[in-house]
Image (cartoon, rainbow, N blue to C red):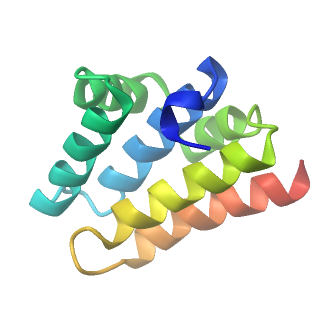
Amino acid sequence: MDVTELEPAEREALYVALAHLSAADGRISDGETAEIAALADEMEEPDLPDLVTKALSDHPELDDLRAIVSKVERDDARELIRTLLFDLAHSDGERGEQENDVLDAITRQWARD
């Protein structure tokens, strides 16, 4: 599966997850910005940075993130989103505790679903 095959609810979950992960440590690094720009090209979604910003303002709490990612039912979509998130988390050369909290929240939600 590639990112162009994500369904609308899966794309929304990706945007919200990207938003929470990139903002987790209180700053968006140059590596994270570059990773989101590369993903925008891959998705053919030039507005991706704006969509990610809007996703965070629309869904600012981790509980919001959990509710959104619970809508992702296809295993291959979950795996793709997880891979994209890990790429983003490592794009600045380090994965902090706050980023781990976001990744853990998603993993635990999917384990419950």
Q: How many marks?
A: 0
Residue 50 against residue 105 in the figure, above or below: above
Residue 8's spot in the image, x, y percent? Answer: 60, 18
Q: Residue at x 50, y 72 (%)?
A: 100
Q: Residue at x 89, y 55 (%)?
A: 112
Residue 67's spot in the image, x, y percent? Answer: 71, 35
Report if residue 60 is visible in the image.
no
Q: Residue at x 50, y 30 (%)?
A: 4
Q: Is residue 55 left or right of residue 45?
A: right
- Residue closer to the observer: 75 or 98: 75
Q: Residue at x 59, y 40 (%)?
A: 65
Q: Residue furthest left?
A: 30
Q: Is residue 48 left or right of residue 21?
A: left
Q: Residue furthest right?
A: 113
Residue 7 against residue 83 in the figure, above or below: above
Q: Is residue 48 left or right of residue 30?
A: right
Quarter of the picture holding the N terminus: top right
Residue 52's spot in the image, x, y percent? Answer: 34, 32
Residue 80's spot in the image, x, y percent? Answer: 59, 51
